[in-house]
Image (cartoon, coloured by chain):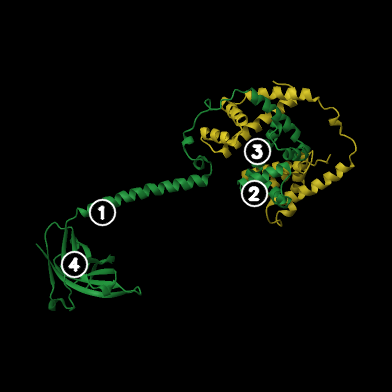
């Protein structure tokens, strides 16, 4: 049992002696090890006694109170105390607008944030941090993408090179102007190759220098193309081979074409 | 009256170490057990609930050297079991009593007692800060749940925290009134 409305009701019933006796022993044992529960019992006792002296207990609750609590040793003293407190409170000049009370800035917060639960505070702090970092990341990504859009891009369509030996193939010539940031290599793919593609770029010596996954085919007037954006800096003068692989329905990758090209710097 | 065999300092330390290896935490658990026992015994109808709680603790403390290595589980349950035994003995004693104890033959008249408590409370309320007095007044005068929610919001706390705060103010007032009443007059 946690301090829930249900537990509050049980404690009140225990104070009045109208509780379910089945849970009584377990509840009483908890009183010896749960300081908060013990405090809650004392608070509810005070509330019941104040209601008793105020005459706001129901008839059945009043009878239950008189047979249960008034037999306890300190109860009569408590009744006397609260009866006297009630008289004192009547004499106090109480302001229903609480104007004489300091007003906390926390009054603008919802009640769960005004609480003293460290779990809630930590959860709220964590959520706030995530929002801040998430926001910062979104701003950074927006900046990065907008920065990319300002990059100088050189696009070229490559024809497929079925023969492996570059010297014997009809190689694509890529004349790169100066001050180019990105080379966009466009290759046509067939519908049989699927929707997801992977690109692998090799030098003519067979060394892998660039790869990119999760490429999507785009539909154009002449068919479908996959666009591979390669940083211009890695394409020094020389021969290269671009291998495109399409993801089959089984999840493995099938060869979708090899495109050889020679970079010439202007 | 139960024969009192006081807890020696050594047996008290033994008891605390059984409750928890950290002395401060052991002290907190001891307080909870002591208050809890007094509360439970009062609800069971014992007029001498504080004395019986002490008796329960004393008996457990005397048993600690024998049980500490064997006993498994929450010590609170052991205290509870001993409290039940102490309560049964108390009931047997009560049944044998046919006369009112002497201390009840010289009770002050209700009117004098009420006046003294009133004066003591009035004096003790003056020891509260203006904010505490205002909180007490608002809390008890405007007792509808919506009004208490509004009061809690004004203070920037939850209703639960407000209840605890009022409870602590009341506990201090009760203590002050009790001391004043024992003196027999307001200082």
Say the numbered circle drawn on residue A43: 3
The residues bearing labels 2 and 3 have C-alpha atoms spaced at a distance of 27 Å
Task: Give a yes or no on whether discs 3 and 1 share a subunit.
Answer: yes
- A29 horizontally vs A108: left or right: right
Residue shown at the point (69%, 56%) measured from the top left: B72
Q: Position of residue B153 (x, y in %)?
A: 52, 35
The residue beneath circle 2 is: B20
Foreground tag (4 vs 3)? 4
The residue beneath circle 1 is: A145
What chain is tagged by disc 3?
Answer: A
- A262 horizontally vs A133: left or right: left
Task: Give a yes or no on whether discs 1 and 4 share a subunit.
Answer: yes
Task: Give a yes or no on whether discs 4 and 2 share a subunit.
Answer: no
What chain is tagged by disc 4?
Answer: A
Element under disc 2 = loop
Task: Give a yes or no on whether discs 1 and 2 share a subunit.
Answer: no
Q: Colour of chain B?
A: yellow
Callout 1–callout 4 Cβ contact below 8 Å: no
The answer to whether residue A205 shows anywhere in this view is no
What chain is tagged by disc 2?
Answer: B
Give the answer, above or below, for where A74 lies relative to B88. above
Q: Position of residue A4 (x, y in %)?
A: 60, 46
The residues bearing labels 3 and 1 have C-alpha atoms spaced at a distance of 60 Å
- A262 horizontally vs B71: left or right: left
- A108 horizontally vs A82: left or right: left
Q: Nearer the viewer, residue B27 or A238?
A: A238
Q: Position of residue B52 (x, y in %)?
A: 78, 42
The residues bearing labels 1 and 4 have C-alpha atoms spaced at a distance of 27 Å
Decide which of tag 3 and tag 1 comes sooner along the chain: 3
């Amino acid at each position: 049992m946690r301090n829930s409305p249900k537990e509050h009701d049980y404690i009140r019933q225990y104070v009045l002696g109208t509780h379910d006796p089945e849970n009584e022993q377990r509840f009483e044992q908890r009183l010896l090890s749960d300081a908060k529960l013990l405090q809650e019992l004392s608070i509810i006792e005070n509330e019941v006694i104040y209601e008793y002296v105020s005459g706001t207990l129901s008839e059945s609750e009043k009878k239950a109170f008189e047979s249960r609590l008034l037999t306890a040793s300190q109860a009569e003293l408590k009744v006397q105390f609260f009866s006297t407190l009630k008289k004192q409170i009547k004499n106090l000049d109480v302001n229903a607008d609480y104007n004489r009370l300091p007003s906390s800035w926390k009054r603008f917060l919802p009640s769960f944030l005004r609480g003293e639960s460290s779990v809630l505070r930590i959860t709220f702090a964590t959520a706030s941090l995530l929002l801040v970092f998430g926001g910062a990341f979104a701003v950074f990504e927006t900046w990065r993408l907008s920065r990319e859009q300002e990059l100088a891009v050189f696009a070229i369509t490559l024809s497929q090179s079925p023969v492996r030996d570059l010297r014997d193939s009809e190689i694509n010539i890529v004349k790169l102007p100066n001050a180019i940031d990105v080379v966009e290599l466009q290759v046509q793919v067939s519908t049989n190759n699927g929707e997801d593609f992977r690109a692998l770029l090799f030098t003519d010596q067979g060394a892998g220098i660039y790869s990119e996954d999760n490429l999507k085919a785009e539909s154009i007037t002449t068919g479908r193309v996959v666009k591979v954006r390669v940083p211009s800096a890695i394409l020094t003068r020389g021969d290269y081979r671009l291998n495109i692989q399409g993801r089959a329905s089984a999840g493995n990758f099938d060869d979708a074409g090899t495109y050889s090209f020679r970079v010439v710097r202007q | 009256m139960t024969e009192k065999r006081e807890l020696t300092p050594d047996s008290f330390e033994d008891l605390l170490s059984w409750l928890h290896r950290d002395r401060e935490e052991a002290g907190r658990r001891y307080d909870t057990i002591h208050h809890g026992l007094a509360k439970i015994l009062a609800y069971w109808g014992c007029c001498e609930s504080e004395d019986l709680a002490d008796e329960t603790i004393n008996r457990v403390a005397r048993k600690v050297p024998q049980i500490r290595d064997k006993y498994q589980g929450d010590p609170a349950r052991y205290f509870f079991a001993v409290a039940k035994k102490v309560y049964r003995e108390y009931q047997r004693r009560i049944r044998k009593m046919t006369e009112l104890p002497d201390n009840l033959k010289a009770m002050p008249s209700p009117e004098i007692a009420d006046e003294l408590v009133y004066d003591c409370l009035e004096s003790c309320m003056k020891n509260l800060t203006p904010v505490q007095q205002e909180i007490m007044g608002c809390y008890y005068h405007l007792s509808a749940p919506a009004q208490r929610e509004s009061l809690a919001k004004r203070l920037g706390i939850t209703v639960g925290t407000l209840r605890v705060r009022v409870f602590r103010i009341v506990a201090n007032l009760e203590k002050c009134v009790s001391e004043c009443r024992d003196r027999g007059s307001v200082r």
